[in-house]
């Protein structure tokens, strides 16, 4: 873990939930928050994945809980909130990292090949799921005097790329939702977005051939892919006391990659 994001003790006494916390960006965020002293609950749909991630985090000395959760389902999220409250006593931080594409056709195919059902399901995963989780934690955060929510967006919200219209639309909607909720929940609860560019994870790498890698690196002035730890460093800032006057913002973690 890079020293730049290993802020030991900064989040001591805080309780964090990371949805989509078993792989990629979410997994990196869960570890960074835990190393900073937070008690961490990771949520994902797969029971085996959350159990394995819980063991990994505990082995690192992190007080962790894994819960199989479908963020699109209100009762499932309610079960997550109740389990975290029972285990840790409350909730201070929520990172909505669950998201992505519902299936390969959702965000990888031409518009004329997309089904309306896939677009709707994409909104359920990337926008409605975030809304459900955020709404569910508000009473818990208010009971502890406030809290911080960070939503993981995407630079796709700013760029028009072939085959990415649906995914980009959901991430643009997420930005708008976050800004609106930030206004309504201030000053007690802060909400912000971290918008990654091209990130090096096993899932994204499986979709990159040599030509795509060359194109993506060419449009990234820093000349390399970002890492989950790069994204986690921004999340760490936003949930820390250093960002106490920051809400309703979108922070781009994209190595200089452009966007409107």
Image (cartoon, rainbow, N blue to C red):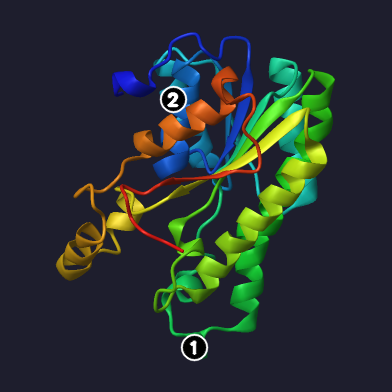
Residue density around tag 2, few if under 14, some if 14–19, many if 20 or more, within 10 Å: many
Q: Is residue 177 left or right of residue 233?
A: right
User: What is the secondary structure assignment of the residue under circle 2?
Assistant: helix
Please state, as top left, top right, bottom left or bottom right, where the N terminus lies in the image: top left
Q: Is residue 180 left or right of residue 154?
A: right
Q: Which of the marked residues, 2 or 1, is nearer the chain's N terminus? A: 2
Residue 215 spot, x, y in % from top left = 21, 66
Residue 185 spot, x, y in % from top left = 80, 37
Q: Is residue 137 left or right of residue 152?
A: right
Looking at the image, residue 218 lies above or below residue 81: below
Which residue carries the number 1 mark? 113
> What's the residue at 65%, 43% (across, down)?
248
Which of discs 2 and 1 lies nearer the camera? The answer is 2
Which residue carries the number 2 mark? 32
Residue 24 spot, x, y in % from top left = 40, 43
Looking at the image, residue 132 lies above or below residue 162: above
Q: Is residue 103 visible?
A: yes
User: What is the secondary structure assignment of the residue under circle 1?
Assistant: helix
Looking at the image, residue 26 lies above or below residue 132: above
């Amino acid at each position: 873990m890079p020293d730049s994001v290993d802020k030991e003790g900064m989040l001591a006494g805080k309780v964090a939930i990371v949805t989509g916390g078993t792989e990629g960006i979410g997994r990196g965020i869960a570890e960074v928050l835990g190393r900073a002293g937070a008690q961490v609950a990771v949520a994902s749909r797969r029971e085996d994945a959350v159990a394995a991630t819980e063991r990994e985090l505990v082995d690192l000395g992190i007080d962790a809980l894994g819960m199989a959760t479908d963020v699109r389902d209100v009762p499932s999220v309610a079960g997550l909130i109740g389990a975290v409250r029972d285990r840790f006593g409350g909730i201070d931080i929520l990172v909505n990292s669950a998201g992505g594409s519902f299936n390969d056709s959702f965000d990888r195919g031409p518009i004329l090949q997309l089904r309306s059902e896939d677009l709707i399901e994409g909104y359920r995963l990337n926008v409605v799921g975030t809304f459900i989780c955020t709404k569910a934690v508000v009473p818990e955060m208010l009971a502890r005097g406030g809290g911080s929510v960070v939503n993981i967006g995407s630079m796709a919200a700013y760029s028009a790329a072939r085959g990415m219209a649906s995914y980009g639309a959901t991430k643009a909607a997420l930005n708008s939702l976050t800004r609106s909720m930030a206004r309504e929940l201030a000053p007690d609860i802060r909400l912000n977005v971290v918008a990654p560019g091209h990130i090096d994870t096993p899932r994204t790498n499986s979709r990159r051939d040599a030509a795509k890698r060359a194109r993506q690196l060419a449009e990234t002035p820093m000349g390399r892919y970002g890492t989950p730890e790069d994204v986690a460093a921004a999340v760490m800032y936003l949930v820390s006391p250093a960002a106490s006057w920051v809400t309703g913002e979108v922070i781009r973690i994209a190595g200089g990659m452009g966007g409107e």
